[in-house]
Amino acid sequence: PVMGSFLANYLIPKESFAWLAEYPEAFSALMYAMADHKDKAGLLSEIVQKADQNSVTLALGGDVSKLTQKPITSFAKQLVMSLRHLLQHKFK
């Protein structure tokens, strides 16, 4: 996480840092996001997360429009089914 903030100095032009410094909340959110403090980065963290999801989905040949659809089976049910499978087949 520390490397993100360190690399920002090399990836973002000095003029951009100077401009961004005029907006302390945006600058703070950027630094928190680059340091992987999602809880403190706020909306910027959500934007980065969604962009990452879209990028991975596209790279794997998936349909980005399906990202917002809820799974047919809830996560809790998937977890229970997976645990049952492990207990029945792997950890007899």
Image (cartoon, rainbow, N blue to C red):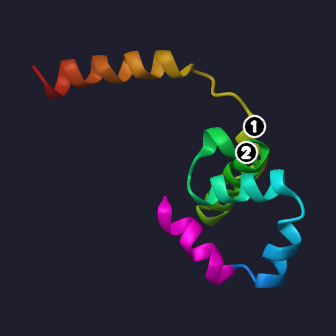
Secondary element under disc 2, as helix, strand or loop, is helix
**Three-letter amino acid code of the residue under disc 1:** Thr
* Amino acid bearing label 2: Glu
Disc on res. 36: none
**Nearer to me, 38 or 50:** 38
Residue 87 included in the magenta stretch of the image: no
Residue underneath mark 2: 46
The residue to which callout 1 is attached is 68
Task: Check disc 1 and report its element: helix, strand or loop.
Answer: helix
Q: Quadrant of the C terminus?
A: top left
How many marks can you see? 2
Question: Who's the residue at 67% across and 61% down the image?
Answer: 55
Residue 72 seen in the current view = yes
Tell me what residue is drawn at x 49 percent, y 68 percent: 3
Residue 18's place in the image compared with 13, above or below, is above
Residue 82 placement, left or right of 8 = left
Q: Residues within 10 Å of mark 2 (few under 14, many from 20)?
A: some
Res 57 seen here: no
Picture coordinates of residue 10, whole percent (x, y): 63, 83
Where residue 67 appears, as percent x and y from the top left, is: 71, 42
Which of disc 1 and disc 2 is earlier in sequence?
2
Picture quadrant where residue 19 is located:
bottom right
Q: Does the CB distance between marks 2 and 1 fall below 8 Å? A: no
The residue drawn where x is 67% and y is 50% is 49
The boundaries of the magenta stretch are 1-11
Q: Taking 84 as reference, is 86 above or below it?
A: below
Q: Position of residue 69 (x, y in %)?
A: 73, 33
- Mark 1 surroundings: few (<14), some (14-19) or many (≥20) residues within 10 A: few
In the depicted structure, whether residue 56 falls above or below residue 82:
below
Front of the two marks 2 and 1: 2
Q: Main secondary structure of the magenta part?
A: helix
